[in-house]
Image (tube, coloured by chain):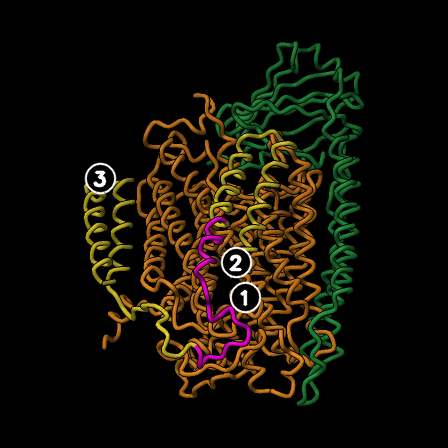
Chain colours: A orange, B yellow, C green
Amino acid sequence: MKHGIIEWLTSTDHKHVGTLYMCTSIFYFFVAGLLALVIRAQLSQPEMTLVGPHQYAQIFTLHGTAMIFLFVVPFALGLANFLIPLQIGAPDMAFPRLNAFTYWLFFFAGLTIFSGVFVNGGAAATGWYAYAPLSEISVSTGGGQDLWIIGLVMSSISGILTAVNFITTIFLYRAPGMTMWRLPIFTWEMVATSLLILMAFPSLAAVLAMLFIDRHFGGQFFDATAGGNPVLYQHLFWFFGHPEVYIMILPFFGVISEIIPVFSRKPIFGYTGLVLSAFAIAGLSMGVWAHHMFTTGVVNNAFFAAVSFLIAVPTGVKFFNWVGTMWRGSIVLTTPMLFAIGFMLNFLIGGISGVMVASPPIDFQAKDSYFLVSHFHYVLGGGSLFAIFGAIYFWFPKVFGRMLSERLGKWCFWLLFIGFNTTFFVMQFLGVMGMPRRIYTYPALPGWGNLNLIASIGSLIMALGVLVFVWDVVTASLSHKHAADDPWGGYSLEWWTTSPPPEYNFTSLPPIRSERPVFDAKHPELARSNVS
Amino acid sequence: MTVGRRLFVSSAIFGIVIAVAYWFSAHNPDGTILLGLMATALVFAAGYMFVAEREARLVGDRSNASSVEASGEQLGVFTVASPWPIVVAFSVFLLLLGLAIYPVLAAFGLALLLFGLFRLGRESR
Amino acid sequence: MRSVRPLLASCLVLCTAGCGIYALPAGATTQAQVLHQDWTVFTLVGLLVAAIVSGLIVFPLLAWRRRRDDYPPQFRQNTKLELIYTIIPLLMVVGLFAVTYRDEVIVEHLSARPANTVDVLAFQWSWRFHYAGTAINIVGTPNAPPQLVLPVDETTRINLTSSDVNHEFWVPAFLFKRDAIAGVKNSFDLRPIRVGLYRGRCAEFCGFDHALMTFTVRVVSQAAYGRWLHAGGK
């Protein structure tokens, strides 16, 4: 029996792989968060000189790249890795060794991206989407850009193979009675997410390869002076880039759909609508990419505006289904539930500002301004990040066998909620007033200094919330109190087994006649109305 | 498995529809090719679902099945531990890094990759 | 109850402060007047949706907190309701799209005979304004931003491109920006309605001095513009 570090380096158990993914991604959250604090310090007042323009460019590039590719996506994939076999009643993933491979590839990808800091010219400094021609070799001469490219190629391979594993496992390894229409919503969202990964990431790999060929093998894909086309870069990148943001939110729609029913003491409302809307969102998201290109003047803005507006409809359906779940329920405001409510309120703002920028006339002012920075932070920070904290508070006992503190959890929530909204709400005003993104400093224009100072103060409040969270995790890990199998009164199969689950997950399974097999087994008198 | 088949068939139809709609509204070859390739991939997957479905008789698909019915059935091979995933991941890392920075590293990475894949294959037997 | 009151207060503050419209420039061109209307429509609809939906989210927290051990009625669906809240948002977005489409056509309309034409070249890290048909070439540097002089109540055609990386020509007071991309010529019309001095900046990250890649737009009376042209742009 291998122990210690060798066990962790060679384990192919999905629970270990999932835990590794989640812990590594949280580490990158801390790194990217520190970078954000530097950004907010630099911008807290006009004309500060904490960092110079080139350092600042590396900082915002690494912040965005790490948050997206090394935190939100890997955390979602890690959570799914841990939960999917449990939720469908399987002993492991279909391809356990492939699973472990994808984690280690992600591990090396993160190192590669950040190693750019140590090379001549520093890390990549062209933003998380690295537009050509700015990222071409004649302009971005250092090796940091190449290391970024390679790290992202590795990430792409890792993600694509994970998606393969997820789809195969969900289709083929469901326990007896676990028909597709009885899958927990989280698992359904992961099917949609996996499809998106398969459709979108190849485009990223392709554009990165083309950029690399331009940089080192005499390619001219994006060089206008040689007959190439910079706009092609944007098409290829955003064909990946837009589905990527849905890859970053669908799993968390799933998390919210798991948390809200349990703490409303009711089944999820509108199960079919939630499933159909997941695929509507996924499908439509493949057709909106050029809403990131409304100001290029060379795309059909109407097509992309129309499809972008349409996506609001299935998203709204989800919101109303969550409200329907809470309606006439019996609500318990635990920490996971607080984060779920916070998610809904934040994502509401992010979604509304998203519908606004889906309109080209509005985008003409908002694009590349702090209005847009506010929008995407509301959906990714206010949305995904809050759902991540909700997921951690909900499933920590299942993963680690210890309960986190409800008292500290509430402090963490309120500090994050207040800090987050303080920082990002005022950015809407800065944006419409004329502050563009990615500037390392700004002049003392009326209102700019004060609003930026407010935003920076908010970031400190958030940092405090994160510290409370760290303290909570540390004290919980050191506690001797073991968590119960089912501390919350959960619904799906992961709550049937021990906390943490044993090797191969289950020693027995309850009958599966609905999407709430554990609830049905514990409340047979209510299960009769449940069959689906 | 019908759900899976329906999923991929409707996705494939959606892909074709949106690729065609895009061509006729934007006349942009870049996006049309991307959407067209996506539709092609989905058609492949949908086609496979028809072939696969003929042989699939999953206990998970039977709504009245109980776990007793699946007991004793060989689900698959689930390894507990293997050193090869991290070795292969490391070799891919060396290979790609070498391509960018130092070709000799790439050669070493390739060799390690082939070795790792070979040992993975042996482990499966 | 205690946990919910601060939540409620935060929502109210956010909703009322949501009038970001106060920070939006009034719009100094005829195109900007149309764009400003879009902002107003979308912000009002957005605030309405935010108020209704956040109310729907918060209301259950106040009305239905757990008070007993037994479970509430376990209903799972209401197909009619679900159809309603699919169709109504669909109609709303169709309406918003119609407004958006109509307004974009107006804003991007190129007049058949613009009174003036300025070729704008973006480069790392400033701008060149060449007044077509004259010898006037205004070139800036990051420390000495160039000034674009425009006549009020006349349509000026801007032809925009880049000689290197992607840049973006943004005048916040005009509520408008457009990309400057090598190999692409972007043309748009500006018809200022107010004399004044407006700030412009590059909005697409373009490298080291991106933050300093600014310019100004001075809108003057037609008479003053004529004199300025005659004097060779001095």
Residue A339 lies in the magenta stretch: no
Q: In this view, does C82 lie to the left or right of B66?
A: right
State the quadrant of the C terminus of chain C: top right
Q: Write down the chain letter for disc 2.
A: B
Instruction: Look at the image and tell me whether residue A406 can be seen.
Output: yes
Classify B48 as above or below A516: above
Q: Which amino acid does label 1 sit on?
A: Met
Check contact, mark 1 vs mark 2: CB within 8 A.
Answer: yes
Q: What residue type is labelled 2?
A: Gly
Q: Which mark is residue A294?
A: none
Between A271 and B84, the residue placed more toward the observer is A271
How many other residues sit within 10 Å of disc 3, few (<14), some (14-19) or many (≥20)? Answer: some
How many other residues sit within 10 Å of disc 2, few (<14), some (14-19) or many (≥20)? Answer: some
Q: What residue type is labelled 3?
A: Pro
**CA gap, disc 1 to disc 3?**
48 Å
Q: Is mark 3 on a helix, strand or loop?
A: helix
Quarter-of-image position of residue C60: bottom right
- In x, y percent, where is residue C98? 78, 40
**CA gap, disc 3 to disc 2?**
44 Å
* Disc 3 and disc 2 on one polypeptide chain: yes
Q: Write down the chain letter for disc 3.
A: B
How many other residues sit within 10 Å of disc 1, few (<14), some (14-19) or many (≥20)? Answer: many
Tell me the residue that label 1 is attached to. A180
Region rendered in magenta: B47-69
Tell me the residue that label 3 is attached to. B103
